[in-house]
Image (cartoon, rainbow, N blue to C red):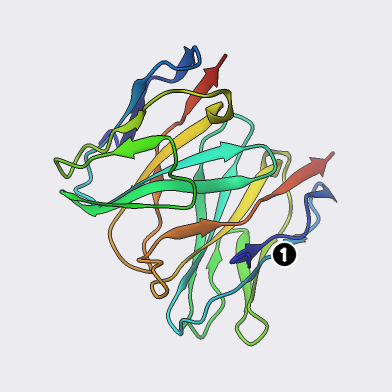
Amino acid sequence: NAGVTQTPKFQVLKTGQSMTLQCAQDMNHEYMSWYRQDPGMGLRLIHYSVGAGITDQGEVPNGYNVSRSTTEDFPLRLLSAAPSQTSVYFCASSKTGLAYEQYFGPGTRLTVT
Amino acid sequence: AQKITQTQPGMFVQEKEAVTLDCTYDTSDQSYGLFWYKQPSSGEMIFLIYQGSYDEQNATEGRYSLNFQKARKSANLVISASQLGDSAMYFCAMRDFSGGSNYKLTFGKGTLLTVNP
């Protein structure tokens, strides 16, 4: 099993550019989420999905879009990159429920100049 | 209000000693799950241990145990016999459902543990 995969591992963007961070899981998990990690801030939830076709906002959704057309894939789109979006981005998946740990991808380090 | 509070930005421990990392949480739900994750310098997130709110026993996983005090809303991680490889950032997290949480996993800001030889 590959688990949760993310591409790319590293990305440098110029302000105003758009891009999509890819996330895929092969565990048939209903629940998927995107986090950003900044120094001293822990992991903050950007968007999440409880199943195909269902997405919702997390704590810091502005500037990001998501869609969930399949159970496996949950891409994160940056619409117009800003330096404030420089961060490490993690995708995670799990079964839906209180007792299930989330499995994390390896992360994408994004720098916006 | 913060849902998860980790008051220790950094902790130091001598190799082979035990260390406790503090975590307090806030929820109005009766059912919730508490998790600890480890993030070494390589960056991956590693799940360590889980405690359910209705679990009567404290969770244990090898050298990790969770000191769960429900009335105090605390879920401290205890690492016994520290090893150099335990040096990492540790995050406490909670899943609850009500108030729009919808099973979202909320993280604390983390504690950076350094194990000294």
Count of picture labels = 1
Counting from the top left corner in percent of width and height, residue A23 is at 30, 33
x 63%, y 64%: residue:
B2
Counting from the top left corner in percent of width and height, residue B66 is at 61, 69
Q: Quadrant of the C terminus of chain B?
A: top right
Q: Residues within 10 Å of mark 1 (few under 14, many from 20)?
A: some
Q: Secondary structure at mark 1?
A: loop
Counting from the top left corner in percent of width and height, residue B18 is at 77, 59
Picture quadrant of residue B99: bottom left
x 78%, y 50%: residue:
B9
Residue B23 in sight in this render = yes
Residue A30 in sight in this render = no
Chain letter of mark 1 equals B
Of A84 and A38, the residue lying toward us: A84
x 14%, y 40%: residue:
A69
**In the displayed structure, would residue B105 be above or below residue A2?**
below
Picture quadrant of residue A75: top left
Residue at the spot of label 1: B22
Counting from the top left corner in percent of width and height, residue B38 is at 58, 47
**In the displayed structure, would residue A108 be above or below residue A98?**
above
Of A68 and A108, the residue lying toward us: A68
Of A25 and A8, the residue lying toward us: A8
Type of the residue with mark 1: Asp
Horizontally, is A69 left or right of A9 in the view? left
x 45%, y 58%: residue:
B105
Of A49 and B44, the residue lying toward us: A49
Picture quadrant of residue A78: top left
Q: Quadrant of the N terminus of chain B?
A: bottom right
**In the displayed structure, would residue B99 be above or below residue A109?**
below
Horizontally, is A57 left or right of A73 in the view? right
